[in-house]
Image (cartoon, rainbow, N blue to C red):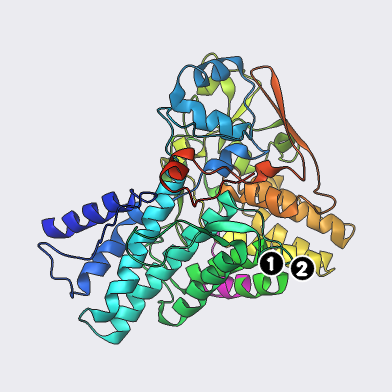
Amino acid sequence: MKSIYKYIAISLSLASLVGCKKYVDIKTQGNLVPNQTINYRYLLNNNSAFEPTASLGDYASSDIEINDASQVTSLLAGSFYLPFVKAYTWQTNIFPLGSSEETDQNWRALYANILVCNTIINELPTSDGTEAEKAALSAEAKVHRADAYLALVNTYAKPYNATTAVADLGVPLLLEQTISQKLNRASVRVIYDQILSDLTTAMESLPNSQALNNLPSKASAYGELARCYLLMHDYTNAGRYADMALAMRNTLVDLSAYTTSTINTYPTRFLNPEILLSRTPQDREAAYPPRIFKLSTQYRSLVLPTDLRYALFTTAGNLVSSDYDPNGRFFTKESAIGQPRNQGPSVPEMMLIRAEVYARNGDATNAMLWVNRLRQKRFRAADYVALTATSASDALVKVINERRIEFYGTSLRWYDMRRLKDEEPFRMTYTKTFNNVTYTLAPNSDRYVFPIAEVLRKTNPELEQNP
């Protein structure tokens, strides 16, 4: 068993070197026999390799604000918090070259994931075991790789636009198990095509379900496809795959079963029936000061105090820290349930994709039906009032608002800001004030795309920077 863990450690440490041109081959060698299929099962069971996903968009979201004097002071006290502050304020250089925080851990974690996936996919065909066993393991790796590329392209590239995606710069597309390749950026279209290819070719060999949510299943792949097509503005396919995911898993956690004193019984992310594929933010420290998320004024205008997502998972500022504003409200779900927030596809996401597709097709009634199916599990019976919509356009606004409430503090709000920025009535200019300086994010801003860390470009000059 030690040799297995040794291989995992070697793979991950080499994966962390993405961005360096030095040739490294990470074929299985040493104490393990390279052609043993079971080795790849052990790699896929290592959730620390695959769960971390990008968190930069969480900070940039319009749903958080940092205006508490004590929190601002703490965040400015050292360079350790610099990337958080720079992402929050949409700055052009988040990881300054030569600083102690010059490495983008989001980029590193996602390409580490991809490198391990490539090793599994490339080596499996010549391993022992049955063809069915090898196909199943390869399928899992393809889902992980697709998820990583979907996070990368929605962090470091422009939002998908069918008319420009073939020319817009995406991210480096690495499909081999070495890091000797040049890091030229493939187009946004090429990256999305690869994501769709990985997911659709994996489908046949995936199990209907898995014992734990960190292991990909058919429901995981359907959920990833629904999310991917939504980001591509392909609402027909988004709705189709959301339906397929919901046909396999549609259970919701009933929040009315919990009180603040018993929230520790909330299901773990590996067993939570809502989660289709467990993904956690690369930076897991948003649960505690000073990086804890404060609900923005705009967000608080959308959520009712009786909404259990507010009542159970947010806390008054003075209860978070004695010197925080008692009138502020902070996101404390992670500390309440004792685990990081999920960023992966879920049953609520599929339900709200289904609702959005109905709204965009002019069917306000069914759109609100799906919204209310979710909301019924987010209120106590005495507090629940069904939402209604006066038109399909009104229903669409209510669906997007429900996504904001349900997915607070996750990448989905940032993804929505990107994909809706040119669409009425969601087209707007956002503002944030931090340390007495006001920052703006206009619909046509380049800051909807995060810069690539200069330390990567220093060793890989072919890696083009974002504007």
Residue 108 visible in the shown view: yes
x 58%, y 22%: residue: 317
* Amino acid at circle 1: Arg
Q: Residue furthest right?
A: 390
Q: Position of residue 74 (x, y in %)?
A: 50, 18
* Towards the viewer: 279 or 89: 89
Q: Which residue is mark 2?
A: 358
x 64%, y 67%: residue: 229
Q: Position of residue 79 (x, y in %)?
A: 45, 23
Side of 202 relative to 38 (left or right): right
Side of 435 relative to 359 (left or right): left
* Towards the viewer: 22 or 341: 22
Do the residues bearing badges 2 and 1 touch, measured as CB atoms within 8 Å?
A: yes
Q: Residue furthest bottom?
A: 131
Rendered image: mark on residue 354:
1
* Amino acid at circle 2: Tyr
Q: Position of residue 454 (x, y in %)?
A: 48, 39
Q: Is residue 221 above or below residue 5?
A: below
- Kindly indicate the quadrant of the structure image that contains residue 361: bottom right
